[in-house]
Amino acid sequence: MFRKSWGGYLMAVLGNALVTAALKLFGDHINSTTVALALLLVVLFVATGWGSRPAVAASLLGVLCFNFFYLPPVGRLTIDDPDNWIAFVAFLVTAVTVGQLSARAKRRAVEAEVGRREIERLYRELQEAFEQASQAKALKQSERLKAALLDAVTHDLRTPLTSIKASVTTLLDELRSGSGNEEPFTLDAEGRQEMLEVIDEEADRLNRFIESMVELARIEAGELRLRRRWGSIEEIVAAALERAAPLTRGHRVETFVEGGLPAVRVDARAVAEVVYALVDNAAKYSAPGKRILVSAEHDGAESIRLTVEDEGPGVPAHLRARVFDKFFRAMRDGDSGKHQPPGTGMGLSIAQGIVEAHGGRIWIEGGDGGRGSRVVVVLPIGDEEEPSARRPDEAEAVQRRDEAEAVSARGNGHAAPPQHSAEYE
């Protein structure tokens, strides 16, 4: 700071000396107004670069040069003509004022720059604080999601495993009874069949759960591949309801399919999976004896509308967009301690992925009369498949697989219903 001030004083001296010497080269023909303006430029330059005090020094030196070299009598620090006194005083006041104003403007500019930097610093600190808060919130949400996922997975794995373990243990105990000191007991044919049916059903339940996890991962990775064929919506709905029959035994299931619906080019197994998931969800949240309505109708000239409506408690409007989030059932705010229907909350998320892969839309709204909820699915009817859309070898492989599935179904003695599949191709 000290060196900077002395540099300003030095510049005041050199500036006035150089300007005075340069003006002297013009001789006596130059007028006092030009001299005054030139010396004011020196004051302005010093004030801008070094501040007010060197500017005052430059003003005083300019006054001395102006008086000594240009106001009569030249070469003396006296003034004879009263008019020259006016010019002298005017120059002195102007020089000091210009110096002060220029120095003040520079000071304000410096202060503004400091303020700007301070604001930028505070903004960065605030942004970092927000980022840290967001990261903390995201971490907290991630921990809650992990806990909810662990709870859901543990429940959905433990429940069928417990049933399978109990049934197998009962069957083994029967085989071991009578040996050693154990009291013999026997199961009749009906009891053995019941145990085996429990094992079979719970194994299927485990398989569906694992496939749901795999399918959801494929959807999120964008690897869901559809096998589109022309088919009937009525047949797709019927197949889904047949599969869901064990879930809806205690409910009144009604269907309405509008007459004259066109065929749709969709993956029938995937769309049946969507209908099954929606009916399953309606059955979980509806009391026994309540109605579940499944309907299909036109939605304009190029799309079909599927709806599944129940008479359960419904979904609040502010949560309807979140019901399609994975594990939402387990993550619902404020009700983690309340009784909840079984499941991991993956069904609607999978349904949304399948519908959107078809180019459709899915949403949830309130039921008629303010009761229950209605899930709406809009699917495009579809266009004719391009001849080049499937390679000949790929088409032949798909046909062979379809034939193999049909033969397998006939060998088992029943029609092959749509199964929960992790990949639709």
Image: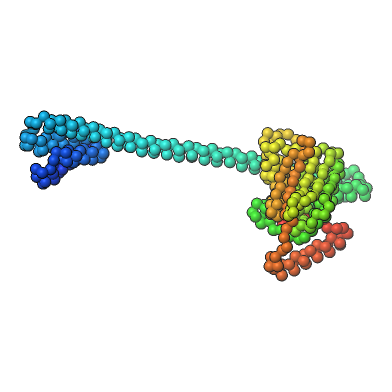
User: How far across and how far down the image is residue 132, in percent?
Assistant: 52, 39
User: How far across and how far down the image is residue 126, in percent?
Assistant: 48, 37
In the image, taking residue 312 as reference, residue 61 lies left or right, namely left
- The answer to whether residue 381 is above or below residue 150 is below
Q: Residue at x 36, y 38 (%)?
A: 113
In the image, taking residue 227 as reference, residue 196 lies left or right, namely right
User: How far across and how far down the image is residue 180, in percent?
Assistant: 87, 46
Farthest-out residue, front? 83
Q: Residue at x 76, y 42 (%)?
A: 374
User: How far across and how far down the image is residue 398, in percent?
Assistant: 75, 65
The C terminus - image quarter: bottom right
Q: Quadrant of residue 331?
A: top right
Viewer can see residue 242: yes
| Colour convention of the picture | rainbow
Viewer can see residue 313: no
Total residue callouts: 0
Q: Residue at x 68, y 38 (%)?
A: 319
The N terminus - image quarter: top left
Closest to the observer, 174 or 382: 382
Closest to the observer, 307 or 252: 307
In the image, taking residue 33 as reference, residue 326 lies left or right, namely right
Q: Residue at x 67, y 42 (%)?
A: 321
Closest to the observer, 214 or 364: 364
- The answer to whether residue 378 is above or below residue 291 is below
